Every structure is written in C-alpha cells, then in structure tokens.
Amino acid sequence: MAWTMRNDVTALVATLDAERDALLAGAHERLSRLAERKERLLKAVARSSGPARAQSIEAEVLPRLIRNRALLLAAGAGVRAAMEALADSEEGTDLHTYHADGARRAADAPSARLERRA
C-alpha cells in the first residue's frame, strides 16, 4: 500500500506541475483534463493512511496546490478583465492604455466620420 500511495503522490505532483505549466502557457484547454486527473489522484491519496502520507502531502503536494490556486485565481481575473474590455469595446466605451510612466490614460476614440480624399 505504501508503494501505491507513493506512486499516487508522485503522479499528483506531476499533475500539479503540468497544471502550472498549462496556466503559465495560457493553455486553458488542457486544464479540464488535468482537473479530472487531479481530482482522481487527490481522492486516491486521501484514501491512503499513515504518517508518511501526511509528510508527503505537506512537503510535496500542499505547496503546489497553494501555488496553483493563486495561478488559477489570477487566470480567472485575467479572463474577467478581458471580457470586460471586450464588452467595453462593443459598447463604444473609450479605450484606455498604459503609458511608459505607468499611468492609465484614455485614448481618443477613432472618428466615425469618413474622410474622402481626391
């Protein structure tokens, strides 16, 4: 049983690292498959017992779970910001940009008037 638990923890660590890589690469299409695998492995690790399990989880799994949670929250915030920006552009809201000094400034909206040149 110890070997199986160790194998499950190793597979979970690899899955969490793959999830991190997918988040950093913006490969959101891989997250669903990784979430299913992660859930299955978390259940398997939770079923195993003993002090070795607790030490492995605390040392190897927990830091990765915390790291990936922060990345998932940041990715979600980025998606929400992108959706808001798209909604603003569809509504004709002014475009905002960030200049070299870091200040946010409204960019002039393009004129709806058509210029004709001879």
Image (tube, helix red, strand yellow):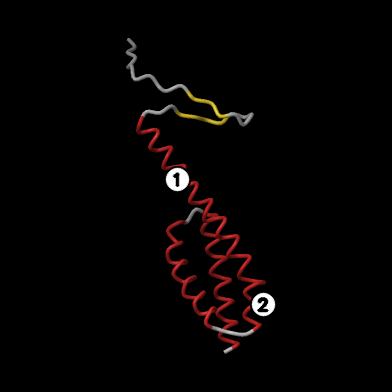
Q: Amino acid at mark 1?
A: Arg
Q: Nearer the viewer, residue 61 or 13?
A: 61
Query: In the drawing, what numbered circle is on residue 80?
Result: 1
For label 2, the crowd category at 10 Å Cα-Cα, with few meaning under 14, some 14 to 19 and many 20 or more, is: few
Q: Amino acid at mark 2?
A: Gln
For label 1, the crowd category at 10 Å Cα-Cα, with few meaning under 14, some 14 to 19 and many 20 or more, is: few
Q: Are marks 2 and 1 in contact (CB under 8 Å)?
A: no
Q: Nearer the viewer, residue 50 or 85?
A: 50
Quadrant of the drawing holding the C terminus: top left
Residue at 60% from the left image edge and 29% from the top image edge: 103
Residue at 47% from the left image edge and 56% from the top image edge: 27
Residue 62: quarter of image: bottom right
Work out whether 83 lies above or below 69.
Answer: above
Secondary element type, mark 1: helix
Work out whether 98 lies above or below 23.
Answer: above
Work out whether 99 lies above or below 13.
Answer: above
Q: Is residue 1 left or right of residue 115?
A: right
Residue 99: quarter of image: top right
Secondary element type, mark 2: helix
Residue at 55% from the left image edge and 67% from the top image edge: 16
Along the polypeptide, which appears first: circle 2 or circle 1? 2
| Residue 4 in picture, x, y percent from top left | 56, 85
Q: Which residue is mark 2?
A: 55
| Residue 6 in picture, x, y percent from top left | 60, 82
| Residue 69 in picture, x, y percent from top left | 55, 59
Quadrant of the drawing holding the N terminus: bottom right
Residue 8: quarter of image: bottom right
Residue at 33% from the left image edge and 16% from the top image edge: 113
Q: Is residue 44 left or right of residue 115?
A: right
